[in-house]
Image (tube, rainbow, N blue to C red):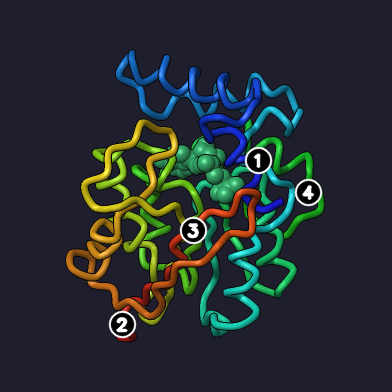
Amino acid sequence: MGFNRASQAYNPGMDGKDRRSSQELAREFMARGDSQGWFEELYRQAEGDPSFVPWADLQPSPLLLQLLDAHLPKPDGPAVVVGCGLGDDAEELARRGLSVTAFDLSETAINWCHERWPDSPVDYRAADLLHLPAEMHGRFGLVVEINTLQAVPDALRLRMFAPLAGMLAPGGRLVVICRVREEGERIEGPPWALCRSELDMLTADHGLENERFELLSDGEDPPRVRYVTVFRRPPA
Ligand SMILES: C[S@@+](CC[C@H](N)C(=O)[O-])C[C@H]1O[C@@H](n2cnc3c(N)ncnc32)[C@H](O)[C@@H]1O
């Protein structure tokens, strides 16, 4: 359900081989100075078994569905899903008639998307948010980011705001859904939940307007509060 398995994977106190193995894998890579290599390794080790991927719910995010149903106007331009994992959010956007690009750092995850959705209209690609091809800049009417910012340590995350905002066309909207951290709170990730002040950088430093900033329960067991946010690049 939703982010349940991500919670199982990361929650202290909840039993699970997944939790230990994904966090240990992440920390092993980070100890070698590589904060991102563990994603590909985790997908590779899963060998096609989604139960090994702690965030793979095999359904679209319920909080994204709520936003799409109740609040988000249909975008003028194409949509892009960042860190798309196994593709459920991207498929949902395509089902709703959007032209969708979805990318992930992990080639194995992208190959898995192709296997799961062989007839999909979604343009799945292996790509790094930190090194996007120029063609992706300024192109999208909707950018969806769920749980990827929180999957990287703070210093790396700071470098992700500019490319995220940079993908928006004038008038386009960026959705960010993530866990909540109190200002100054120290956490040992992954994941590294976000402070409000970090998300405020999207308006202060990257030219976006904030349209929606909610704290919503994700309905998990136990429930967690998440930021559900929408930012907009002002129309030209
Ligand atoms: C915690 S998972 C979330 C996946 C999916 N968005 C979800 O909510 O289920 C983070 C995803 O972001 C991908 N990722 C991490 N760093 C990335 C980067 N720099 N560029 C693109 N994808 C990245 C990982 O491979 C992983 O699939």
Q: Which residue is mark 1?
A: 5
Around disc 1, counting alpha carbons within 10 Å, would you say few (fewer than 14), some (14 to 19), or many (20 or more)?
many
Q: Nearer the viewer, mark 4 or mark 1?
A: 1
**CA separation in Å, label 2 and label 1:** 36 Å
Q: Nearer the viewer, residue 154 or 73?
A: 154
Between residues 96 and 61, which one lies in front from this camera angle? 61
Label 2 secondary element: loop
Kind of element beneath mark 3: strand
Q: Residues within 10 Å of mark 4 (few under 14, many from 20)?
A: some
Q: Earlier in the sequence, mark 4 or mark 3?
A: 4
Quadrant location of the C terminus in the rendered image:
bottom left
Amino acid type of disc 4? Answer: Trp
Residue at 45% x, 23% y: name it: 26
Which of the numbered marks, if any, corresponds to residue 225?
3
Type of amino acid under label 3: Val
Q: Return the residue at label 2.
A: 234
For the residues bearing labels 1 and 3, Cβ distance under 8 angstroms: no
Mark 4 vs 3: CB contact within 8 A: no
Q: Which residue is mark 4?
A: 117
